[in-house]
Amino acid sequence: MRRTSRLASLLTLALISLPMAALAAPDVAPDFKLAAAGGKDVSLAQYRGQVVMINFWATWCGPCRQEMPVLEQLQHKYKPMGFTLIGVNVEPDSVGAVDWLKATPVTFPILFDTDSKVSKLYSVSGMPSTVIVDRKGNLRYLHRGYKPGDENEYLDQIRALVREQ
């Protein structure tokens, strides 16, 4: 009992001596600028103040193709509440993505990370990978992979973040 209370006191002292930033430092989403379908450059910074979902995908990825219509529904439903979805295609040649999107059109921006610089910034290790950024530009959620039903988790997280001010 005595040993336990001493350990608790030491832990409390250690926590008190840490700077507050070290206890709750948010991870800021790295800014980037990429070419979008249609040729215009798009940056993450231009969406500051919105909840942003960044979805890294490729045409050769079955779960990515399966997820795309679900993402389009999220964009359509939550855009009026300050939500934006950005699709980042990770293939070295964007021609295949452009062709694939003709059959599966989306209304959210599709960007092309042909040299994988942005994918590396976000430590993308598999497809699809999705990050959700809050209105202040902080990384809040990371999802790796996709299977039907994962959109329920997306919905919970998006709803919570669009309510934050």
Image (cartoon, helix red, strand yellow):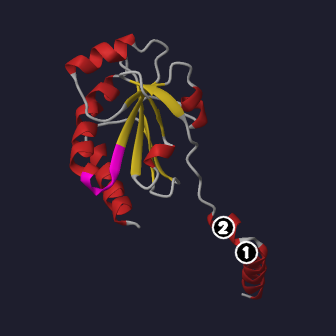
SS under mark 2: helix
Residue 43 in percent (x, y) is at: 49, 37
Residue 16 sits in quarter: bottom right
Q: Is residue 150 left or right of residue 58?
A: left
In contact (CB < 8 Å): disc 2 and disc 1: yes
Residue 149 visible in the picture: no
SS under mark 1: helix
Residue at figure coordinates x 37%, y 23% from the top left: 37
Asked whether 158 or 153 is in front, the reply is 158
- Marks counted in the figure total 2
Asked whether 36 or 28 is in front, the reply is 36
Residue 106 sits in quarter: top left
Residue 148 visible in the picture: yes
Residue 25 in percent (x, y) is at: 63, 62
Give the extent of the magenta segment: 80-84
- The residues tagged by marks 2 and 1 sit, at their Cα atoms, a distance apart of 8 Å
In the rendered structure, which disc, 2 or 1, sits on the residue that comes first in sequence? 1
Residue 141 in percent (x, y) is at: 46, 51
Judge whether residue 81 is colored magenta: yes
> Looking at the image, is 27 positioned above or below residue 21?
above
Judge whether residue 155 is colored magenta: no
Identified by mark 1, the residue type is Leu
Position of the N terminus by quadrant: bottom right
